[in-house]
Image (tube, grey):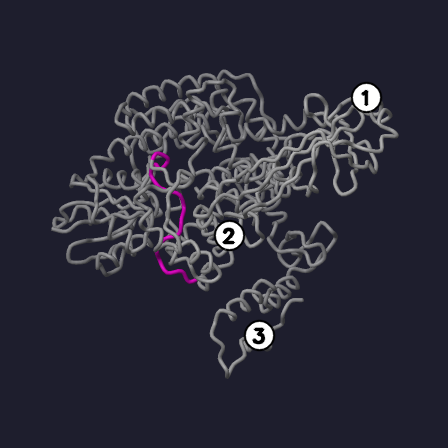
Amino acid sequence: MKTLVLAEKPSVGRDIARVLGCKGGGGFMEGSKHIVTWALGHLVTLADPEGYDKKFKSWDINHLPIMPDKLKLVVIPQTSKQYKTVRELLLRKDVGDVVIATDAGREGELVARWIIEMAKCKKPIKRLWISSVTDKAIREGFNNLKDGRQYEPLCDSAKARAEADWLVGINATRCLTTKFNSQLSCGRVQTPTIAIIAKREEEIRGFTPVPYFGLQADMGNFKVVWQDRNNSARCFDREKIEKILAGLQGKKDGVVAEVEKRIKQKMPPKLYDLTELQRDASKKFGYSPKETLSIMQKLYEEHKVLTYPRTDSRYISDDILPTIPERLKACGVPPYGKIAAQILRSPIRPNKNFCDNSKVSDHHAIIPTEAYVNLGAFSDKERKIYDLVVTRFFCVFFPPFEYEQVAVKVKIGDEMFRANGKTVLSQGYQAVYSGGSDDDDDDELQEKSQTLPPLKRGEKIPVTAIKITEGKTTPPAPFTEATLLSAMENPAKYMDSKDKVIADTLSKTGGLGTVATRADIIEKLYATFYIEKKGKEIFTTSKARQLLKIVPKDLKSPELTGSWEQKLATIAAGKMKKEIFLQEIRKYTRETIVEIKNSTATFKHDNLSTTKCPECGVFMLAVTGKKGEMLVCQDRECNSRISLSTEIRSQCPNCRKYMKIVGTGEKRQVVCGCGHKEKYENFEKRKKEEKNQMSKREVEAFINESKNKKPDPKNSPFAALKGLNLKK
C-alpha cells in the first residue's frame, strides 16, 4: 500500500516529491511508497446561498436570514480539474493512508480536511508539521509524522471560524445592500478596521493645536532647556515665560546643580514575524503588506532560503538551536560572510530575547534556512526582504547596544535648566547595520544625542544667550499601511468597553485578522472603495463613513473578534464543541438582520459623476482606488468600470515623485503633479533605454563582488563595465 501526501501548493508538493523519490506530472507525482499531490490553495469551499435554493440567486431582503441546517461544501469551479485528480488519488485502492502536508496552521488544516471530507475519504490520516521546505526539514518531518486525530480540534476550530464568517458575512452584506440599495459589505474584521481608521480621522479633525513655550539657554558648546517644578519643558502661558525670561536678564553664569551618569542598554530587536516584517517593508521600501507576503512566499517556496512566512511568533524554540550554525553558514555569503563568521567564532548561547518555547505557537519566527543562498537569483525586492530578515537574525546573537546617559541640571538665577547627553560605550548589535544603527525611531535616544563636555557639580558656566522657544501640540498622524497593521495587531485600545479578558485574548490571538489575512483585508478595503490612499496615508471614503452609521454596533468593534477567538481557542483545545459556538452565531445573526431591517438610517451616494454606464445606462460613481481614479457602475449586478488614471511606480525625471497614466488609447499620457507630461509611447521608450543602464547600487555591488574574487592577471575586474552607460 502507498501513502498519499497532500500539499497545499504545487511548488511545495514538488519539493516533497523530490525528497521522497516521486516522479511524474499531471497533478501528482508517484514513487514506490508515496504519491504526492497538491491543492491550489482551496479546492473546496462553502456553497453560496443559491446552492441551497435557486431563489437566493436574487438578493431579496425578505429571504433573510439565510440559515441552512448544515452548510454544504462545493468544489471551486476554477480548480475542479485538480480536485478531481486529488479525489481519485484519495480513493485509489492501493492508497492506505493520507499525510496532510498543507501549511501547518488552522487554515492549512482546513484546506486539507475539506478536500478529504468532500471526497468522502475515511482512510487514516497523519500530519506533516514543518516550518521550512528545505530537503532536511522535509526528511525530518516525515521521520516525525503526527497522528491526524491530534489535529481534529484544530480542524473543528477552523470549520467553526469559516461557518461563522459565512453566516454573519453573507447575511449582513445582503441585508445592508438590499436595504440601502448600494454595494455594501461588512464583516467582523474589515468593518472594525474601517472604524479604527475613522476614529483616528475623528481625533485629527477634533484636534485643536495649542501653542506652548519654553526657554533655551546657550552655554557655549552645549544648550540647556528650562524645566518647571514638574520637570516639564512646556509652558502654555506665554506671559509666564516672558516674565521668567525678564528675571534672567543680566545673569551671566549658570551653576551645575547636578550631574547624573547612568549606563543604559538597548536590547537587540526581536526576530521577525510576518506583521513586523510587513511594517518594516512598508516604512523602508513602500511595499504593501500583500506585496511583502508575496515576496516572502517566493523566498520560502522557490528559493527556500527563509522559513514559513505566515507566523505570528517572534521567537524560536529550543529544538531550532542546534541548527543555528548551519543556518549562519548558509547565509554567510557576501556581503554577510564577515558577520556570520564573527558569530560562529563563539558558542551560540540562547536567551529569552529570541528563544522561548512558551512564545512559539504553530510556527517560530521568520529566520534563514540551511539552504544554499544564491543572491544573484533574487530580484531587487527579494534581495531587500531577505536582507531585512538576515540582518535581524544576526542581531539577536550580538550583545545589547550600550551607552552612558548623562543628565545635567544647570541653575541660572532661580530657574532650573536641563541637558541630556549620550556617549556610546559599545555598538553591540548595532554594529550589524552598515550605518552603525538599526535606524529605529527612538525618541529617548534622540533626546540624549547632544554631546556634553565634562562637567562637575558646582562648576560655573558662562551663559551666552537665553531665548524663548515656541511650538504647537500636534494631532495623531493619519494611518499608513505600516501603522494600520500595528493597529490591527493590537486593537484593544480601540474597543469601546474595557473588558480585560477580551483585550487579552485579542492580544494573544493576534488581533484583527491573522498574519496571513491582514494584507488581503487591507486590499479588499481598497477594492471595495472603503479606504483610499493619499501619498502614504490612508483615509476612509464617504461610503465607509456612511457604512459605519448604518452597520450594527457589534460589527464595528474588535470585541466581536476577541469574543470569537476566545471560543475558537477553546474549541482548538478540545474543551468546547463547535456546534455550541455555531448555535450562538446563528442567534447573533438573526438579531443582526432584525436590527438592520428595522434601521431608520439612510445611505446616499455623494460621488455620482455625469458619465452614464456604457453597459446599463445608470450614472457611474467617481472613486479613487489604490492605484488610481476610476468610474464604477453603481449597479452591483453590472459593476462596469472605466479607468481615469493609474498611478505607476516610476519616478518623474524632474521631481522624482511617482507619476500616473491618464487618458486612454493613443491619447494616453504620463503626468506628474509638478507639471511634467510626456506621451505614453515616449515614456515607454525612455524606460526601455534606462533598463540598459546600470544603477549606482548595481555598480557598487559589482565592485564589492569583484574585491572578493581572486584577481585574474588577464582580465581587469572592471572589464565587464566596458561599454555600459553608467548613471551619473
Say which amino acid is labelled 1: Lys
Residue 497 to residue 214: above or below:
above
The percent coordinates of residue 351 (x first, y second) are 39, 40
Query: Decide: marks 1, 2 in contact (CB < 8 A)?
Result: no
Question: Is residue 619 among the parts visible in the rendering?
Answer: no
Q: Quadrant of the C terminus?
A: bottom right
The disc placed on residue 712 is none
Work out whether mark 1 precedes mark 2 in sequence or the reverse, and give the earlier one.
1
Query: Decide: marks 3, 1 in contact (CB < 8 A)?
Result: no
Mark 2 or mark 3, whichever is nearer to me: 2
| Secondary structure, magenta segment, majority class | loop
Q: Is 156 or 273 nearer to us in this picture?
A: 273
Q: For marks 3 and 1, give the CA distance.
A: 67 Å
Q: Which residue is drawn at 26% across and 23% down?
A: 575
Residue range highlighted in magenta: 358-374
Residue 252 to residue 603: above or below:
below
The disc placed on residue 240 is 1
Residue 586 to residue 12: above or below:
above
Work out whether mark 3 precedes mark 1 in sequence or the reverse, and give the earlier one.
1
Which residue matches tag 2?
Answer: 432
The percent coordinates of residue 683 (x first, y second) are 65, 61
Q: Is mark 2 on a helix, strand or loop?
A: helix
Q: For marks 1 and 2, give the CA distance.
A: 48 Å
Assess disc 2: are there few (<14), some (14-19) or many (≥20) residues with their C-alpha within 10 Å of its C-alpha: some
44 sits to left or right of 657: left
Say which amino acid is labelled 2: Val
Q: Quadrant of residue 109?
A: top left
Question: Is residue 42 among the parts visible in the rendering?
Answer: yes
Q: Quadrant of residue 64?
A: top left
Which residue matches tag 3?
Answer: 721
Q: For marks 2 and 3, give the CA distance.
A: 30 Å
